[in-house]
């Protein structure tokens, strides 16, 4: 059996701050439709979504309705979903009054349980959404959990597991599919189970490029073949980065960040100066003026500083 998997769709109407489209919902739906069409070509017509279908439980009626209309255009595709933290009210359990809950009530998707398995073509599936643990064993485990390929994604990162560790934690799963980490990866270990010589861990990655760190990122979905537990990454079509990212805005934001860091360092130096011995008492106006000349604040901030300096006695 072959099926398609994806995760971290984060469907929303709000355009991420570094992108410049006026209809971001349309962008999300176009990519979802591409994935649905890929699922249609498989023998199982099965699509797995490993969490964070929506970006927020406060999605507009338009967002939920648009997604439902798209899914209803593909009635023969079976969609199995586990909830991510963005699909849950206040990032806790409970799908009542959520867009994901509406999709299930409408019959468009099935939310996988962590308490019992779902069997399709002799392959068993079990889910474990955000903050859940699987309570039964299955061939395929679908989770929304931070899994990295080999180690931390940034210095000091905590609350994650590696692909190798998660495969060892659930030795009964031939394939573990995860969402939450927006960087995709596939990982295989040699481990004979039911006559197969290896086991898979697939982290799907995000559907769209939403941050400046993803400018060169290629979104993908994955095709899993259960006959030999192999996988193939399928590239999702994207527009050139210069057509979707606002590079001027990104440059301005980066400049602001650099200026903020510089200002913080200078203020720290200023405070340290004030904390020194009173043998040589610093001139407040002179020090603050030096900081202002180097940081170059905007007019509103400058006016406040000028007013303050007029009132300060040295």
Image (cartoon, grey):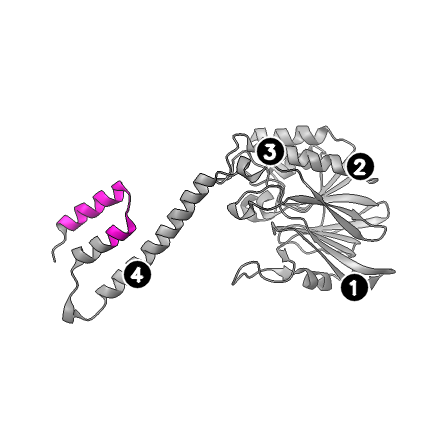
Q: Nearer the viewer, residue 292 or 84?
A: 292
Residue at the spot 53% in from the left edge and 48% down from the top edge: 213
Find the distance from the CA under tag 2 to the CA under tag 1: 30 Å
- Residue 307 is covered by the magenta coloring: yes
Task: Tell me the SS state at disc 3.
Answer: helix
The prevailing secondary structure element of the residues shown in magenta is helix
Q: Is residue 291 left or right of residue 200?
A: left
Find the distance from the CA under tag 3 to the CA under tag 2: 22 Å
Q: Which residues are magenta?
A: 291-310
For disc 1, the marked residue is 190
- Badge 1 crowding class, 10 Å Cα cut-off, few under 14, some 14 to 19, many 20 or more, is few
Q: Is residue 27 left or right of residue 34?
A: left
Mark 3 and mark 2 lie on one chain; the one further toward the N terminus is: 3
Which quarter of the figure has residue 89?
top right
Find the distance from the CA under tag 4 to the CA under tag 3: 44 Å
Q: Nearer the viewer, residue 110 or 146?
A: 146
For disc 2, the marked residue is 41
Find the distance from the CA under tag 2 to the CA under tag 4: 61 Å
- Residue 117 visible in rendering: no
For disc 3, the marked residue is 27
Quarter of the image for the C terminus: give it.
Answer: bottom left
- Badge 4 crowding class, 10 Å Cα cut-off, few under 14, some 14 to 19, many 20 or more, is few
């Amino acid at each position: 059996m072959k099926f398609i998997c994806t995760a971290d769709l984060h469907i929303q109407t709000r355009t991420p701050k570094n992108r410049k489209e006026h209809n971001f919902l349309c962008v999300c739906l176009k990519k979802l439709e591409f994935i649905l069409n890929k699922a249609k070509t498989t023998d199982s017509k099965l699509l797995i979504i490993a969490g964070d279908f929506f970006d927020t439980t406060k999605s507009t009626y338009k967002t939920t309705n648009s997604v439902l209309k798209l899914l209803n255009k593909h009635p023969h595709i079976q969609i199995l979903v586990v909830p991510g933290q963005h699909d849950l009210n206040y990032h806790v359990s409970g799908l009542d009054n959520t867009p994901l809950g509406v999709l299930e009530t409408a019959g468009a998707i099935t939310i996988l349980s962590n308490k019992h398995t779902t069997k399709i073509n002799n392959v068993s599936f079990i889910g474990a959404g955000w903050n859940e643990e699987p309570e039964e064993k299955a061939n395929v485990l679908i989770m929304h959990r931070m899994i990295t390929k080999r180690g931390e994604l940034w210095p000091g990162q905590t609350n994650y597991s590696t692909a190798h560790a998660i495969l060892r934690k659930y030795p009964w799963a031939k394939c573990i599919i995860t969402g939450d980490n927006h960087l995709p990866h596939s990982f295989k270990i040699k481990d004979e189970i039911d006559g197969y010589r290896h086991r898979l861990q697939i982290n799907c990655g995000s559907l769209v490029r939403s941050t400046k760190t993803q400018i060169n990122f290629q979104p993908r979905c994955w095709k899993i073949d259960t006959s030999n537990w192999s996988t193939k990454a399928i590239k999702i079509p994207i527009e050139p980065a210069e057509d979707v990212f606002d590079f001027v805005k990104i440059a301005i934001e980066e400049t602001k960040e650099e200026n903020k860091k510089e200002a913080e360092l200078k203020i720290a130096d200023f405070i340290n100066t004030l904390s020194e011995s009173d043998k040589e008492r610093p001139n407040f106006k002179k020090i603050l003026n030096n900081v202002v000349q180097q940081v170059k604040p905007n007019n509103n901030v400058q006016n406040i500083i000028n007013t303050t300096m007029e009132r300060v006695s040295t």
